Amino acid sequence: MSVPHLLVFVLLVLLPPARCQTISQFDVCRSLRSSEAGPGWEFYACQPPPTNMKEVMQIRVDPPGITCGNPPERFCTLENPYLCSDECDASSPDLSHPPQLMGDRERGGLITYWQTVTWSRYPEPLLANITLSWNKSLEVVDDIVVTFEYGRPTSMVLEKSLDKGVTWQPYQYYADDCLEAFGMSPKRVSDLAPSNLTRVICTEQYSRWVGAKEEKVVLFEVRARFGVFAGPKLINMDALYTRMETMKGLRDFFTFTNLRLRLLRPALGGTYVQRDNLLKYFYAISNIDVPARCKCNLHASQCVLRDATLQCECDHNASGQDCQRCSQGFKSRSWRPGSYLPLPKGSGNTCTYLHTHYCECNGHSNRCSYIDFINVVTCVSCKHNTRGQNCQYCRLGYYRNASLSLEDESVCVECQCDAEGSESPHCSDSGFCRCKVGATGRRCDDCLPGYTWRGGGAVNVCDDERLVCQNGGTCIDFQRCICPDNVTGCENPANNDKECTGPEEMTKGVSGFSGFLPQSRNMLRFIGDCKLSVGVNVSVLGCLSLSVAL
């Protein structure tokens, strides 16, 4: 297994299965399909699978010196405020609490955490910023979970950046008193409606003191926001995907390149600050979960870690870290993000080839698509009933007129195979249809000798010697032919031991008459050849008197 694919595999297994089930659609970018125009790619909207991005995030804390342990110091807990026997020492692996412990895997039940210095400089605010960077656009797919040890902050702000940390905007405010801390009325996500789902709110749900051990987590609720459209159990994801396309700003709301936690006031234990024991006030975070996927503008189904940087494996003739532009050789202005619509597979919105004259479509198309999988350029939407990589073949149901050049708009001629006489509407390269038994002709619209047309070529045998009623006559009881209107012919009574000498005498004097008199050991029978009336009377050797009137 190659290193990039190994990294993809590693990213996939990091997220618990329950979270992966949140959004699992659109995992295929293209599919090879057969059509009348020949085999070709069908492109779909696609996106990488979600994973826990904490495994690849870079963590920075500031201001400098905010992490405890340098110099070493003692600290207490809010639940045992006067038992200050714990120590933080950056020089000791067992007593240090560096920032990377916010994103590590905790093994064997041992909780590791990052910790700040204590609030020994009160009333100066104890402020700390935690910046999480990926150097890549991501889309959050489930709740962001921050786990605090020794109490959740009294007030904090979650911020996001869309430009790799150049500018920042608030994502959500948290406080035990939103009105006092931020001048905002407290709200919950459940208070939001579809029309204001992207509103930045302040919540008191995760900041009030209920005990350091009872409540540790602070959430940025994504699942509940998805549920506004998809339902509480996220069953109707199609409704969410539709809103992602039609509601302005919704997709951008769940997009970020960086996240930042601004810790503004530590947990106070439900009381005011007690100046006589400031060693119990600090921040400590043991874990940050960020379930997200690489944002690839619906042009990639995989995201790999290459040179310590996340990179979309782009399809649809797109390129760039986020598949945000067309590849070289394709029209830059033709770039568009993929679309979730139409459901269920969406639209790939592939980039179009730059030079149409390189398409070599024989004048039947001016659009091309580059297929990087097999490294070829193929024509798209061949016209004039043509198909193929260069529009060089005729569609099924058509054949090439060899007398015309391949560039002629009329080069492909419709087969026009007779629906009743042919086995298929398709014909050979020379235009001949495949006929049913008894039918003949290029279009299978004629009958072979010995066959009549009865909703298709059908043999019209009249006795065991395979003597045939012709010209539309119908055999009755293996004895005689009944002719159509305006056509007369011969019946076959018993001959009373009189013999006829042969068909040439019967046809005497009647131009075009081709009946014949077979002779049988038991019975002389005559199978008539139905003919149009010619206005003469014929008597044949006493065997049969035939009156043909005008």
Image: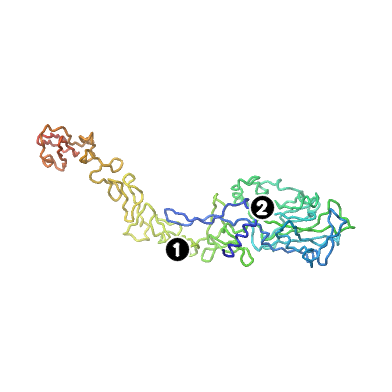
Q: Is residue 526 visible?
A: yes
Q: Determine which quarter of the picture holds residue 453.
A: top left
Q: Quick one: SS at disc 1?
A: loop
Q: Nearer the viewer, residue 457 or 500?
A: 500
Which residue is label 1 attached to? 359
Which residue is label 2 attached to? 142
Q: Nearer the viewer, residue 484 or 470?
A: 470
Q: Nearer the viewer, residue 409 or 110?
A: 110
Q: Amino acid at mark 2?
A: Asp
Q: Quick one: SS at disc 2?
A: loop
Is 464 placed left or right of 100 in the picture?
left
Q: Determine which quarter of the picture holds residue 132.
A: bottom right
Residue 94 % position (x, y):
78, 63
Residue 523 % position (x, y):
15, 34
Residue 324 image label: none
Q: Amino acid at mark 1?
A: Cys
